[in-house]
Amino acid sequence: MTSLLQKTILFSLIPVFMMIIGGIIAIYKKPGGNARSLILHFAAGVVFSVVAVEILPDVIKQHKPVQVVIGFALGLITMLFIKRFAETNKKEEEGITGSKLPISLLTGIGVDIFIDGILLGIGFSAGGSAGMLLAFALAIELLSLGMATATELGNNNLSKKKSIIIIIVLAILFFISAMLGVVLLRNSSESTMEIILSFALSALLFLVVEELLTEAHEEKETVWHTSSFFIGFLIFLILGMLV
């Protein structure tokens, strides 16, 4: 087993366990809206920091504008499709009474988690500290996602046991997609990696702007919520310098 694969396995387990922990916490003690908003703001700052410090410089230094446009456009189209799919199915499901398993919600979350895992694999394939920093950033995101998923499953009257099993399955999906990402992409050419990194750049920016911050702003904004975004950014900016 190569050192790259070993490192990916080790660091991908951090988001996996964080999602499971977040889910279990929410199942037995539902977090308040303020706490979740703080976590989401912090996660957004962390992910944005990884984009600015690690991924964007790697994209720029290759000087391949055509590949950048292709990858960036593919990332945006993919994330828009996922968002549209999730919203459409959520509306259809809202009209169905007595449905205890929110299939559309779980499908949307599953696709989101799969993409996150692939992005982590891309981070490790790119080399440097991008993979490690992204692992911690995604761990914070999946902690919040685990809480949100568990809350939604509870609202659909699923038992605690079934909710925990579903969250574990979703967390394992992240691990599998991270392994796929690093195995399939580690020997890619410079042009291919430029497309892939640009895809990751676009997808992560979308994650910050259209998902994390949008959900975070569902609660009343305070100076503490706003500050947590910048604290997350600063912490991982410094870590990027030291790692």
Image (spheres, helix red, strand yellow):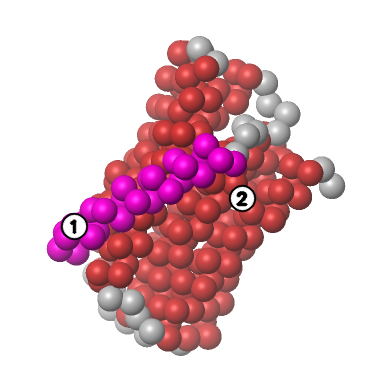
Main secondary structure type of the part rendered in magenta = helix
Tell me the residue at 18%/57% (across/down): 223
Of the pair 177 and 213, the residue shown nearer to us: 213
Magenta stretch holds residue 28:
no
Q: Where are the magenta residues, as a range?
A: 217-243
Instruction: List x then y, in percent, for residue 97.
Output: 28, 78
Q: Amino acid at mark 2?
A: Ser
Query: Of residues 239 and 206, which is closer to you in this image?
Result: 239
The numbered mark at residue 86 is: none
Please determine whether, in this image, residue 140 is positioned above or below residue 30: above
Q: Residue 134 in the image: state x and y as whole percent.
A: 53, 46
Residue 115 visible in the snapshot: no
Q: Secondary structure at mark 1?
A: helix
**SS state under label 2:** helix
- Of the pair 216 and 240, the residue shown nearer to us: 240
Residue 74's image quarter?
top left
Q: Which residue is mark 2?
A: 177
Based on the picture, tell me whether residue 229 belongs to the magenta stretch: yes
Name the spot of residue 34 as percent of width and height, x first. Answer: 25, 69
Rendered position, 198 above or below 223: above
- Looking at the image, is mark 1 or mark 2 nearer the viewer? 1
First in sequence: mark 1 or mark 2?
Answer: 2
